Amino acid sequence: MSPQAGFDAAKEGRYQEAIPILEEYCRNCAEQGSAEYCTAQMWLVRGYKATGEIGKALIICQKLRLSEHQKVSDWAGKMYQKLNESPEAETQTAENPVVNKKAVGAAGVKLAMAGVGGNLALASTVTMSLMSGMVLVLALGIVLIADSENPILGLGIAIAITVLFNVAAFFLSPFLMDLTQSWLYKTRWVELAEIENLSPETIRVIRRVCQQKKIKTPRLGIIEDQNPTAFTYGSLPNSARLVVSRGLFTYLDDDEVATVYAHELGHIVHWDFAVMTVASTLVQICYLINVTARTVARSMGDNKVADAAKTASLVAYIFYFIGTYLLLYLSRTREYFADHFAAEVTGNPNGLSRSLVKIAYGIVEEGSRAKEPSRLIEGTRALGIYDAKAAATTGNAYRIASEPEKVGRVFLWDMFNPWGWWMELSSTHPLTGKRVRALSTYAEQLGLETEFDMGKVVGEGKHLNKKKLYGSFFTDILFFGAETIGFFSGILISVILASSGVQNPGLIISCPLIGAGIGVIVKAFVTYPNYSKAVETDVLTLMSDPYASPLRGRPAKLEGKLIGRGDAGYKFGSDLKIQDPSGMLYLRYASRFGSLGNFFFGMKRVESLINMDVASVGWFRRGVAPWMDLIQLKSENGTVVNSYHRFGSFLTGGFLIILGIALMVLLAGV
């Protein structure tokens, strides 16, 4: 689309009319470095300034200051200074909870963690010990010590393989990661001077930390991507790599960027980045052994070697599963300690709190402009400072940060909903509300006013309906595994019937199938309740519900614009992103024909729906990331899209029940 109508309206001072046109153009523009795009951004700055939205104007100015066009960069620098000096900026700073409390405490003061995050040394030791032990056991199985002529020699070979592989993984993983970074994300390695031009405070922090901890300055990298993120990897502190995206400098202020770098330096000082590098490699080894052993078992037919390969495959998968959760636990623990380190060395825990919120906002904002989710954010999820899956709630709250209680309210679910703890088990990062609460305690220890009023959030959390919160949770856990409970109940019933003299060999198969089918249908009634009374609401209201569940769907109606696909890097993805004035949410589509129907919907229909204003009905759910299971979409031109999540569950459950009954009847006379 052309931005000319927006330019014309802006030149005549009709900014209320110009802003929506220019926003839509910028959101859909494929060439974000073009002169026309920069012009549209400059007019948006003027429009936001005229309408009093100084915060939005400042964010665009920060981005334009990094433009390759010198005139644009100079203009943005001057405008940024004017905006900061304006009375409106002072007013918004006073009202905005994310940008007002700039006070910094004394750097280097020891801060108590008060039990937050567990014990990093213990988590690292347990993870590495168990993972190394798992690889050793697999090596023993592969070498087949028990069946060798010389078991002692076999044991020695297995131990040697394990040690050599772990050492190789430790030293080679960073170089393999370098190749991956260069290939996938075009990482550019830079000198301190370039970082200093972008964030002077960051260089002061890097030099101070490296001098105090007696480590070399890490190799610094920048990825030219506007999604804000930062991560560290390597084997030894003196050969670490610290990489950030361009978006970090766009969305964060100087002192906030410095806290992010301090956080990443914390990983280096604690050596947890090295443990993560090796542990990740060991987990992948388990997975590779599982795949290889399974392939060998299939190709060997039915003999002793095939049986051994099947056993090795099963054990490797179990170790892979356990290792994954150990790695996730270590990942969450190390984030708490890196936050603590950043607060200590900068004396600015509030700056890191702001950074987390702004990074979430940046991810949401960039996601609203892109037709597909960022591969950088998806690919570096485990390594990054922030879990992109959790960005939607916090990032959307930042959009209306002039209302502090709404920013804090989205943290209620993180801190008090038992599903938050359950979902966090599968997350690489602690939930944002818990991290901000910990950072608030550090601010209090430094005598600073906290960035967010977490005391008020905690107070509100204590008045939540505990019966509704926990009673529903424990009931939902049973429904969550309804098909599994039904399956094993069926086995128990078949055993009881067989022991009581009932002669039907089909019982051992049919009863579990019938039980599982009943479980699927019962679960469907809970998961997909009646939606006839779904109420109209907005994205932020749904995300602020402290009782939200990933299982028990909340019927809701949303109106907004479809802004892209929800599947990262998948051209034929069937999931969608909807945006309303309060935020963005993922919509999950389900065809009545299963995965094949989803593929054809993504291939043939999704592209034509993007950028349409729609009314949607669905079941809202919240885990680490919130989403809505779609029931129906209606576009402005009359197009209707129906989705069949509940139908699929009923069909699956019914099929299992019918199959179980059929087997029971067919095998009754055998």
Image (cartoon, grey):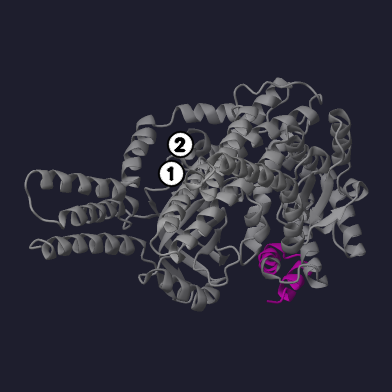
Residue 527's place in the image compared with 597, above or below, is above
Residue 15 is one of the magenta-drawn residues: yes
Residue type at mark 1: give it: Ala
The quadrant holding residue 162 is: top right
Q: Verify CB contact (< 8 Å) between mark 1 and mark 2.
A: yes
Q: Give the residue number, with chain letter if any, for mark 2.
A: 417
The quadrant holding residue 335 is: top right
Secondary structure of the residue carrying tag 2 is loop
- Residue found 80% across the figure and 38% down from its top: 237
Residue 103's place in the image compared with 139, above or below, is above
> Which of the two residues, 344 or 269, is positioned nearer the viewer here?
269
- Residue 233: percent from left, percent from top: 73, 46
Q: Give the residue number, with chain letter if any, for mark 1.
A: 548
Residue type at mark 2: give it: Asn
Locate the C terminus by quadrant. Answer: bottom left
The label shown at residue 399 is none
- Residue 3: percent from left, percent from top: 72, 73
- Residue 158: percent from left, percent from top: 59, 44
Magenta span: helix, strand or loop, mainly? helix
Q: Is residue 188 left or right of residue 263?
A: right
Q: Is residue 551 left or right of residue 26?
A: left
> Which of the two residues, 563 or 473, is positioned nearer the viewer here?
473
Residue 37 is one of the magenta-drawn residues: no
- Tell me which segment is drawn in magenta: 1-25
- Residue 513: percent from left, percent from top: 23, 56
Q: Bin the neighbour count of mark 2 within 10 Å (Cα to Cα): few under 14, some 14-19, many 20 and up.
A: many
Task: Of the two numbered discs 1 and 2 on the same chain, state the one appearing first in sequence.
Answer: 2
> Which of the two residues, 214 or 557, is positioned nearer the viewer here?
214
